[in-house]
Image (cartoon, helix red, strand yellow):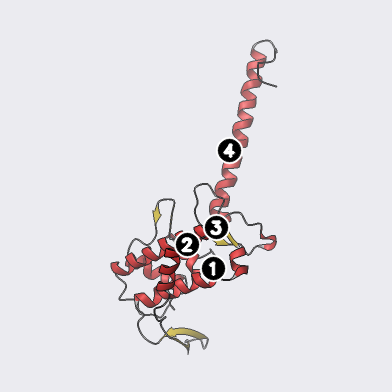
Amino acid sequence: MAAPFDLRFDCGRICLDLMATTGRSAERLAGPEHLAAWLVGSGVVPGSAQLGAVDRGWVVRFRMLRELLRRVVHDELRGRAAEADLRLLNAAATAAVPPARAVRAEDGALVRAFTGPPDCAGLLAAVARDAIGMLTDAAERGRLRQCEGESCTLVYLDTSRGRRRRWCSSEVCGNRERVARHRRRATRGADGAVAEAKAQAVGGAPVAGVR
């Protein structure tokens, strides 16, 4: 089943999933309901959390963190993030993360629950700490990949066998690439047929530049 609001949770880390809420001119954190759905879907908050306090102010702050993450992660992939951005990321991580406890669900399974309604700063800190953990783990950094899809800016963790994953999603960017490759082959085939027809039209003499 598709995630609500076309949200994606397949990039391998919470911070990368937040970065995936924008791209290709699409804004997936358009309002409080979108952010609430992302917070639950990404696992930042348990499904039982009370999110009535989520408002436009929260959306703005999460978008700002998303842009900061985009700069830091992409700059680190290319070489080195700006020290000013690292200070901002570290500052975002200092707020107290909402305390959680293990409780029994109706089916008897243990599930995570917050002890009270979470605040925006604490949830931002949880995402910022996830990014810090990823960037300071050499193994995780080595699996970071930029999607090879045309005009796609998503970054993901490559956990595939052989580390040969090329796209953020085989069903999305991978399928676009396969369709484009098929069209290129079809175009080349059509061009060859046209050239052959032209050669036959002049009595079978080869057309200049065509073999």
| Between discs 1 and 4, the one toward the N terminus | 1
The residue drawn where x is 61% and y is 28% is 190
Image position of 175 with respect to 37: above or below = above
Q: Position of residue 205 (x, y in %)?
A: 70, 12
Q: Is residue 76 left or right of residue 206?
A: left
The residue drawn where x is 64% and y is 26% is 192
The amino acid marked with disc number 2 is Val
In this figure, which residue is indicated by the disc labeled 2?
A: 72
> Between tags 1 and 3, which lies in front?
3
Q: Residues within 10 Å of mark 4 (few under 14, many from 20)?
A: few
Classify mark 2: helix, strand or loop: helix
Classify mark 1: helix, strand or loop: helix
Residue 135 — which label? 1
Q: Is residue 194 left or right of residue 59?
A: right
The amino acid marked with disc number 3 is Gly
Q: Residues within 10 Å of mark 2 (few under 14, many from 20)?
A: many
**Closer to the camera, 150 or 70?**
70
> Between tags 3 and 2, which lies in front?
3
| Between discs 1 and 3, the one toward the N terminus | 3
In this figure, which residue is indicated by the disc labeled 3?
A: 79
Q: Residues within 10 Å of mark 1 (few under 14, many from 20)?
A: some
Q: CA distance from mark 3 to mark 2?
A: 10 Å
